[in-house]
């Protein structure tokens, strides 16, 4: 448990002789992914009780440093993974988006707990119903709040995801910013018409501007 | 130590000298000893003071909504009342549509160890404005409490120096969330709520003067100068 030292044949990037990609590039992918997965610096965005469990995860008993998360990076510009622990009210939505935009690529997001993932029990006028309406999310950790084991499992899932990434995939790091003048642009109201309600509210919609 | 170490504020304990305060037990729901300030208020302000009742040992007195600031100033300043501390300002709206909205002030006298609850009724008859005088001039603690009460209930505190929303963002358009006619999930759709929230610029909370960069304005990058120069406002 902890540091990844060997490629997991089920998940890691491996050399396929039939592929046009050569041995060097696939090995390099593994090396880069290995380095990234084992040194994810978290940017803690703790807004509620989930942040207390996150602190417990980072403290000595559960020891997040085993995963290369030696350093809580309270600067978004020096972090790799944004861990949103807690509910995000609408007033905080532009702040969360700004922090995500300030992070450098490569970057990942863990949505910790029920409130960050779906709004949880706070189906009210003040709380965003899931941070995936604001920023893209890689791993959702359920729980209210999740135990440290749950968060560690989410982090290990993220490590597996990092290990599968290919540098040849050029779209991997694209941040889609919708251009309203483009023909491909779908206005949020149209997305709401086309998609089913989701989450715990009949008023909840999928569109994010 | 200098002479400044002598406290100028002396606590006058009610009852016998040396008597220690005790926690009262077995308090009746209704009835009980009324706060003596109520009689003093009636003698001083007459018809501006409405009914008074004792609930769970605490005295509630209804005050004419236009006279609140004068009553508060007298209660705070009169040496026989000496309500130094404003504990809370809030409002109550009842589900009964005929019942008035009540604005509530909780005040406490540290000197006489008394608690008093002032209430002002704002009838929902469509004619009475939802406004009461601000007590900011009496207790500075009222500043944020009145802002919160305005934010959540839409009650205007006349004379407040800076009556803005405090919990919701300033461009919030959906109304006053704690009113009974406010739907729990808000009036707009989720996507519209999120769109309006995300339109706010999180870095645009302060004016140029507040940022104390007026002197260095010319040295700033062009885009910052453009943003700050126009008296930057939040949101849309």
Image: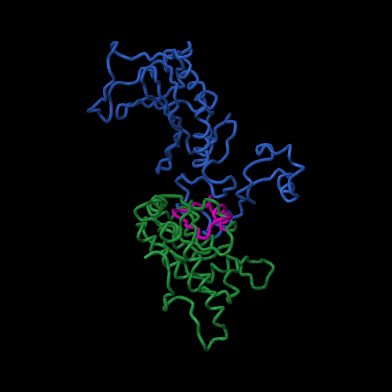
Left or right: B134 as drawn, with respect to B14: right
Q: In the picture, residue B198 is in which quadrant?
A: bottom right
Left or right: A96 as drawn, with respect to A50: right
Find the residue positioned furthest to the bottom: A18
Of B221 and B151, the residue lying toward us: B221
| Residue A125 visible in the snapshot | no
Q: Position of residue A181 (x, y in %)?
A: 69, 68
Q: Position of residue A207 (x, y in %)?
A: 54, 65
Q: In the picture, residue A8 is in which quadrant?
A: bottom left
Residue at 40%, 13% in the rendered image: B10
Residue at 52%, 77% in the rendered image: A27
Q: Position of residue A169 (x, y in %)?
A: 58, 76
Q: Is residue A207 above or below residue B92?
A: below
Of B207 and B35, the residue lying toward us: B207
Left or right: A25 as drawn, with respect to B229: left
Q: Is residue A29 above or below residue B73?
A: below
Residue at 73%, 51% in the rendered image: B223
The way the protein has been coloured in the rendering is by chain
Write down the region rendered in magenta.
Answer: A77-100
Residue at 40%, 59% in the rendered image: A66
Q: Position of residue B162 (x, y in %)?
A: 59, 34
Q: Which shade of the palette goes to chain B?
A: blue
Tell which chain the image draws in green. Answer: A
> For residue B3: magenta?
no
Find the residue positioned furthest to the left: B26
Of A49 and A19, the residue lying toward us: A19
Numbered-mark total: 0
| Residue A139 visible in the snapshot | yes
């Amino acid at each position: 448990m902890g540091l990844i030292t060997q490629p997991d044949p089920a998940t890691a990037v491996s050399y396929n002789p039939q592929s046009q990609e050569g041995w060097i590039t696939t090995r390099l992918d593994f090396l880069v992914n290995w380095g990234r997965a084992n040194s994810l610096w978290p940017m803690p965005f703790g807004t509620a009780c989930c942040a207390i469990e996150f602190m417990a995860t980072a403290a000595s008993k559960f020891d997040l440093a085993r995963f290369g998360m030696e350093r809580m990076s309270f600067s978004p510009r020096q972090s790799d993974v944004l861990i949103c622990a807690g509910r995000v009210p609408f007033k905080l939505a532009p702040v969360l988006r700004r922090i995500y935009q300030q992070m450098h690529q490569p970057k990942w997001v863990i949505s910790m707990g029920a409130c960050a993932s779906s709004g949880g029990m706070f189906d009210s006028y003040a709380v965003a119903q899931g941070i995936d309406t604001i920023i893209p999310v890689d791993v959702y950790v359920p729980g209210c709040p999740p135990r440290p084991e749950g968060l560690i499992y989410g982090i290990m899932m993220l490590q597996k995801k990092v290990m599968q990434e290919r540098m040849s995939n050029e779209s991997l790091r694209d941040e889609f910013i919708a251009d309203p003048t483009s023909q491909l642009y779908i206005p949020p109201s149209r997305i709401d018409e086309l998609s089913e309600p989701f989450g715990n509210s009949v008023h909840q919609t999928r569109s994010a501007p | 130590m200098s002479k400044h170490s002598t406290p100028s504020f002396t606590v006058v304990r009610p009852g016998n000298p040396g008597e220690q305060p005790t926690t009262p037990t077995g308090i009746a729901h209704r009835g009980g000893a009324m706060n003596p300030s109520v009689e003093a208020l009636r003698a001083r302000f007459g018809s501006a003071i409405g009914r008074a009742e004792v609930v769970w040992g605490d005295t509630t007195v209804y005050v004419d909504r236009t006279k609140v600031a004068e009553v508060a100033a007298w209660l705070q300043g009169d040496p026989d009342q000496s309500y130094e501390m404003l504990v809370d300002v809030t409002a109550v709206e009842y589900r009964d549509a005929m019942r008035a909205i009540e604005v509530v002030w909780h005040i406490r006298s540290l000197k006489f160890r008394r608690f008093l609850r002032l209430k002002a009724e704002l009838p929902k008859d469509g004619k009475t404005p939802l406004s009461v005088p601000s007590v900011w001039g009496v207790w500075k603690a009222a500043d944020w409490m009145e802002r919160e009460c305005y934010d959540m209930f839409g009650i205007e505190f006349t004379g407040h120096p800076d009556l803005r929303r405090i919990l919701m963002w300033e461009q919030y358009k959906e109304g006053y969330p704690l009113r009974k006619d406010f739907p729990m999930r808000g009036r707009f759709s989720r996507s519209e709520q999120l769109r309006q929230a995300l339109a706010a610029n999180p870095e645009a909370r302060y004016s140029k003067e507040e940022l104390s960069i007026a002197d260095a304005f010319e040295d700033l990058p062009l885009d910052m100068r453009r943003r700050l120069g126009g008296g930057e406002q939040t949101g849309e």
